[in-house]
Amino acid sequence: MNFKDKVVLVTGSSRGIGRSIAVKFAKAGANVIVNYKTNAKEAEAITEIISSYGTKCMCIQADVSKEIEVRHMIETIIAEYGRIDIVVNNAGIAIDSEFDDKRVRDFQDTLDTNLIGVFLVSKYAGNYMLKQEYGKIVNISSTNGIDTTYPYSIDYDASKAGLINLTRNLAIQFAPNINVNAVAPGWIDTEMNADLSKNYLKEEKDKILLKRFAEPEEIADVVLFLSSDKSRYIDGEVIRVDGGIKFA
């Protein structure tokens, strides 16, 4: 897939899935905007890698849950590039804890980033896309928002379920010129799993038909497909990428 000269914003792209998505777009010729909240050093490192592919790259610090920061981020992108073609809403947080220890603040912070943040970025970027009469928005949800729910991540699960509904509403709002879809990954092989026990990880892998977790690049491949013209007749959909999870 060729994204030459496309302007792509990937939120939360200093590490993990977002980092892989940003690099994939750069390899495909896109001009990539790396967004981060606190990881400045990692964001600068990924910016250097992206620039090595010969495309333009901008690094912007912004908390997607803050409307004023989102508005400034989108205005900065437009001022630099004159357009925005693709948005990948990847920024997200998880605050896992036992149900009885879960705080209202945990719920609020998780919803602010994982759900309201997507609304804000999509709203401000989408308004420019409507003027262009072209755009692609891909939201990173989770199978946790569908059927792999866990009480200790009840706030995260709720946010990802809400994101699926938001995706469908945004598809209606921005039709017919902007495609809005979501990817729902299952387990991903990232550093976030480093603190989990080997026995628990094995149990989770045994539930998957492919007997392994996804590599971040495998999620990025699906994101790029949904961002390309090859998916121009897909709208308001959620694509599961979970290796075939089996449920009891």
Image: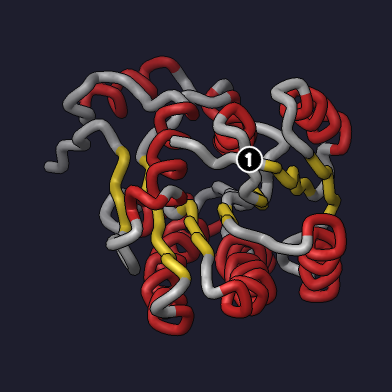
Q: Residue furthest left?
A: 248
Residue bearing the label numbered 1: 30
**173 left or right of 97 in image:** left
Could you tell me if residue 194 is visible in this image? Answer: yes
Taking depth in this image into account, of 11 and 30 the one nearest to the observer is 30
Which percent across, then down, holds residue 65?
72, 67
Residue drawn at point x = 48 percent, y = 52 percent: 140
Colour convention: secondary structure
| Residue 235: quadrant of the picture | bottom left
Q: Residue furthest bottom?
A: 173
Q: Is residue 216 shown above or below 127?
A: above
Could you tell me which secondary element the residue under label 1 belongs to? loop
Could you tell me if residue 116 is visible in this image? Answer: no
Q: Residues within 10 Å of mark 1 (few under 14, many from 20)?
A: many
The kind of residue on which mark 1 rests is Ala
| Residue 111: quadrant of the picture | bottom right
| Residue 145: quadrant of the picture | bottom left
Residue drawn at point x = 39 percent, y = 66 percent: 164
Q: Is residue 196 shown above or below 149?
A: above
Residue drawn at point x = 82 percent, y = 68 percent: 75
Which percent across, then down, holds residue 30?
63, 40
Taking depth in this image into account, of 81 and 65 the one nearest to the observer is 81
Quadrant housing the C terminus? top left
Quadrant housing the N terminus? top left
Taking depth in this image into account, of 195 and 120 the one nearest to the observer is 120
Which percent across, then down, holds residue 188?
44, 31
Q: Residue furthest top?
A: 198
Residue drawn at point x = 59 percent, y = 40 percent: 4
Taking depth in this image into account, of 118 and 48 the one nearest to the observer is 48
